[in-house]
Amino acid sequence: MSAMPFARHLGMEVEHAADGEATVRLPLGEEHSSLPDRVVAHGGVVHALADTAGGAAVISLHGEPTPTVDIRFDHLAPATEDLVATAEVLRDGDSVAVAKMTVEDVEGTRVAVGQGVYKTGAPEGPSTWGSDPESSLGE
């Protein structure tokens, strides 16, 4: 996941991805803000962080990219501090996996919760998302 250009562009750091669990950190900066006069993370930044953690948790089980099929997300508080997203795979099936995600700031305030569905079954032939497990987790 650290090799994903989008996650790298936002400044996300995958701290842990193994056994269906993941932790991803985002040092919050001015570039992530939805307001011009103070740092309050844009909802899309929080969403992307949670989705990245959910994907990393699923990839840790499959060793290859697992595109997001659907995601359900609730924003609970404004994000004004560095963020940490955790994810846990609830179900790992032949065609899809389901992960729950939580985003908190470094002070422990719960900022958002979500649940994502990720495609785990690959079609025959080459995939748009690739299949090199080493590049998927960036390790």
Image: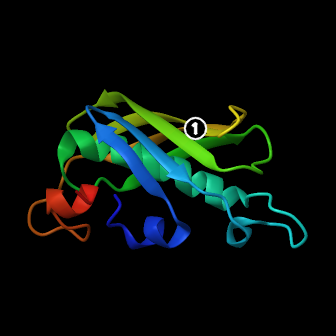
Q: Residue 57 is drawn in which quadrant?
A: top left
Q: Is residue 72 left or right of residue 79?
A: left
Q: Position of residue 9 (x, y in %)?
A: 50, 73
Could you tell me which secondary element the residue under label 1 belongs to? strand
Quarter occupied by the C terminus: bottom left
Give coordinates of residue 73: x percent, y percent: 63, 42
Residue that appears at 69% across and 66% down: 32
Give the mark count. Answer: 1
Q: Residue furthest right?
A: 37
| Residue that appears at 19% across and 67% down | 130
Camera-nearest residue between 42 and 30? 30
Q: Is residue 97 left or right of residue 102?
A: left
Q: Is residue 70 visible?
A: no
Residue drawn 44% across and 41% down?
23
**Which residue appears at 20% of the width and 37% of the height?**
94
Q: Position of residue 63 (x, y in %)?
A: 18, 49
State the residue lying farthest toward the top: 90
Q: Which residue is mark 1?
A: 114
Q: Amino acid at mark 1?
A: Gly
Quadrant (top left, top right, bottom left, bottom right) of the N terminus: bottom left
Tell me the quarter of the picture where residue 92 sits: top left
**For residue 126, above or below residue 23:** below
Circle 1 packing at 10 Å, graded few (<14), some (14-19), many (20+), is some
Residue 85 visible in the snapshot? yes
The answer to which quarter of the image holds residue 129 is bottom left
Query: 139 above or below 17?
Result: below
